[in-house]
Amino acid sequence: MSRRTRPEMIAETRAKLIAAARKAFGEEGYAAASMDDFTAAAGLTRGALYHHFGDKKGLFEAVVREIDAEMAARLAAIATAAPTRWNGFVEENIGYVGMALDPEVQRILLRDGPAVLGDPSIWPSAAGCIAGIRANLEQLQADGVVRRDIDADVTARLVSGASTDAALWIANAEDPAAASRKAIPAFKALLEGLLRKH
Amino acid sequence: MSRRTRPEMIAETRAKLIAAARKAFGEEGYAAASMDDFTAAAGLTRGALYHHFGDKKGLFEAVVREIDAEMAARLAAIATAAPTRWNGFVEENIGYVGMALDPEVQRILLRDGPAVLGDPSIWPSAAGCIAGIRANLEQLQADGVVRRDIDADVTARLVSGASTDAALWIANAEDPAAASRKAIPAFKALLEGLLRKH
DNA sequence: CACTCGCATACATGATGTATGTATGTTGTC
DNA sequence: GACAACATACATACATCATGTATGCGAGTG
């Protein structure tokens, strides 16, 4: 008799592997994280890992996808809560900076991510966060708030690039709180360059 | 008798190792580059490498320093050649985007660099490029061209972050030339947000 | 009841790092 | 100025460990 059905057990195994890997990747970094170690921590072996994810990189992709999805959801919530669309756009990006202060996000997405998976724009997750920013930008252009002579695609990348770098800078600063207070206005100033002149 | 003096031979060995490593890191990436292979390509063994650079990461640092110095020099040349300071600032940043299109720069500095050495702001090279941008910004603030209510340090980071991301995006685009034409105006628009209102 | 498949075990390969050896250049002394 | 003692640049050999693959077992399923 099976107390649990098979698909359930599979899902549980995958979840355990992803959770253990996420922790290991976040704390030690991708290269230093030993598959033997963190699969053991999850009460499994590398056999399960290779069965479900093919290789170490495949598991890393799954972890990235999970984190990316969480971030996209939080960003969307921030954006919809804002009074005006432009305000939502700005808040969303500042929220992005805040999330990038999380050591796990920083290490996995910002530091190791590009090295392992290449440029974020070609990631399997298709970088949900950037897609969100771009959609917002296009709407703002349609509303006449943002200048129309710039491409939403690149701009979304530029903006997210600036945010992530700001976050890295803040996180590595001696006084992160103070650094954050300096970063926000500078970031807002840059974004204002996108507004239509009047 | 010694046809060459000792310091000369040492310098030559170091240069050969750095050159071979730069090529290997650029083409295969840091993790995939085998020390046995590229030291052999330089006519040496790992013995020389460990003697001069301590470990693989140490050699990587040396390569980064070299590339960074080259870039800083080129950027400085671009900036001084411009008619106005603001113009030089903009051109410098666009030049930065252009240099980041070089596959070697991209792979070593932008992709593997953060994974191996951490955030660029704490690199041994102290990221000469960013320092150059910051110095320029401070001067522009003193001249009254750029708004003074923002911090030059963060802003330099934000701007360089946006440039590098733009470069990555362009390099991975299907049509890099077209992508570049779209990226430049968007980038200029962002920078205009830094100007003092009038 | 046979069979698929999720997962563990055992092994092959290759990479890094260290300990040791050698040969060459440098320096001190007569 | 020559020879010896020494320092050091670099090579070789080895220990350790990580990934990936091939194989085997056992539990859930039709």
Image: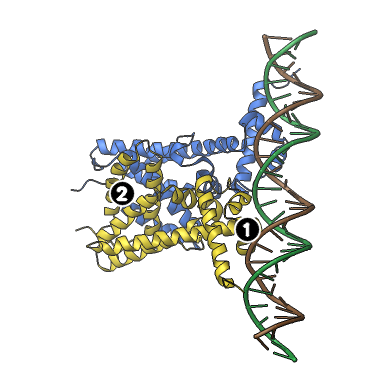
Chain colours: A blue, B yellow, C green, D brown
Spot occupied by residue A74 in the image (x, y as percentages of width and height): 46, 39
Eyeballing the image, is A124 above or below A145? above
- Residue D6 located left or right of residue A95: right
Residue B17: in sight, yes or no? yes
Q: Residue at x 50, y 46 (%)?
A: B27
Precedes in sequence: disc 2 or disc 1: 1
> Which image quarter holds the N terminus of chain A?
top right
Residue nearest the observer in this picture, B69 or A129 = B69
Residue nearest the observer in this picture, B64 or A39 = B64
Spot occupied by residue A193 in the image (x, y as percentages of width and height): 27, 50
Q: Name the residue that disc number 2 marks.
A: B187
Within the image, what quadrant is residue A75 found in? top left
Q: Residue at x 48, y 57 (%)?
A: B120
Q: Amino acid at mark 1?
A: Asp
- Residue B27 located left or right of residue B154: right
Q: Nearer the viewer, mark 2 or mark 1?
A: 1
Disc 1 packing (10 Å; few <14; some 14–19; many ≥20): few
Disc 2 to disc 1, how far (Cα)?
39 Å
| Element assignment for label 2 | helix
Q: Which mark is residue B55?
A: 1
| Element assignment for label 1 | loop
- Mark 2 and mark 1 in contact? Answer it, CB < 8 Å: no
The chain holding disc 1 is B
The chain holding disc 2 is B
Spot occupied by residue C25 in the image (x, y as percentages of width and height): 62, 73
Q: Residue at x 50, y 38 (%)?
A: A70
Residue nearest the observer in this picture, B192 or A177 = B192
- Residue A113 located left or right of residue B92: right
Residue A77: in sight, yes or no? no
Q: Amino acid at mark 2?
A: Phe
